[in-house]
Amino acid sequence: MRTQRRLTRLMQLVLVGLVAYGLVDGQPKAIVNGSVALLITFFPALLERNYDLPLDPWLGLWITAAVFLHTLGSAGLYGQIDWWDHLTHALSASLVAGVGYTVARAVDLHADDIHIPSRVAFVYIFVLVMAFGVIWELFEFALDIIAASTGVTMPLAQHGLDDTVRDLMYNSLGALLVGTFGQVYLTDVAETVRERLLSVES
């Protein structure tokens, strides 16, 4: 547990350093990406403080690693390391899959008239991630159009149809991993969400 927390804190410190670098060197991209990523890393702590919803340190590390690696990619590693984009897409997709499954499973546990079999959950995870991936690619495409018409450098960009197809392939890999191996682990998380959030609302 201490190791996970230390790794999370280390990545947060690097993000703080990236934001500081952006402020000193006048790099708005570094400031925006670093700040947004840093805010996301505090989301687990926010859930614990405001909703009494403690999350496993591994989940906090999972969330932090996803945004941390993406931020490093935006800082230059996407252009320097070919496989970095594949890594971040697979990890981010697995995070989307994990969140989607946790919410669906929590509702399944909470409502007596709703039952989601494991096979259906697997398909749901896969479809959810693919849909999110398509929306993300459309978002990048829209940013490209805005950048071309305004001359403003955007934090995200598309790099052709081949890149889009590869992104979706690695998104599928992340969904496949969570759908195959993550359901057992995330069921406990879903149970916690049901107890702390849904039960209170009902």
Image: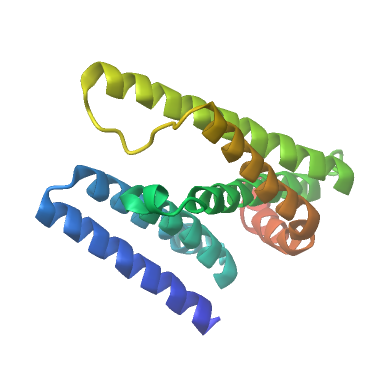
Closest to the observer, 10 or 141: 141
Closest to the observer, 88 or 180: 88
Residue sticking out furthest to the bottom: 2
In-image side of 89 versus 195 (left or right): left
Which residue: 73% across, 40% down? 126
Which residue: 57% across, 39% down? 167
Which residue: 25% across, 49% down? 30
Picture quadrant where residue 157 is located: top left
Query: If the image is split into quadrants, where does the C terminus sit?
Result: top right
Q: Is residue 28 above or below residue 195?
A: above
Q: Can residue 115 be seen at all in this image of the molecule?
A: no
Question: Residue 22: x percent and y percent?
Answer: 18, 53
Q: Is residue 150 above or below residue 88?
A: above
Question: So how many labels did they put on this image?
Answer: 0
Query: If the image is split into quadrants, where does the N terminus sit?
Result: bottom right
Picture quadrant where residue 81 is located: bottom left
Question: Residue 11: x percent and y percent?
Answer: 39, 68
Q: Can residue 64 be seen at all in this image of the molecule?
A: yes
Q: Is residue 150 above or below residue 34?
A: above
In-image side of 64 versus 131 (left or right): left
Closest to the observer, 199 or 183: 183
Q: Give the colour scheme of this rendering.
A: rainbow
Question: Residue 152: x percent and y percent?
Answer: 22, 28
Closest to the observer, 181 or 186: 181
Which residue: 32% across, 48% down? 33
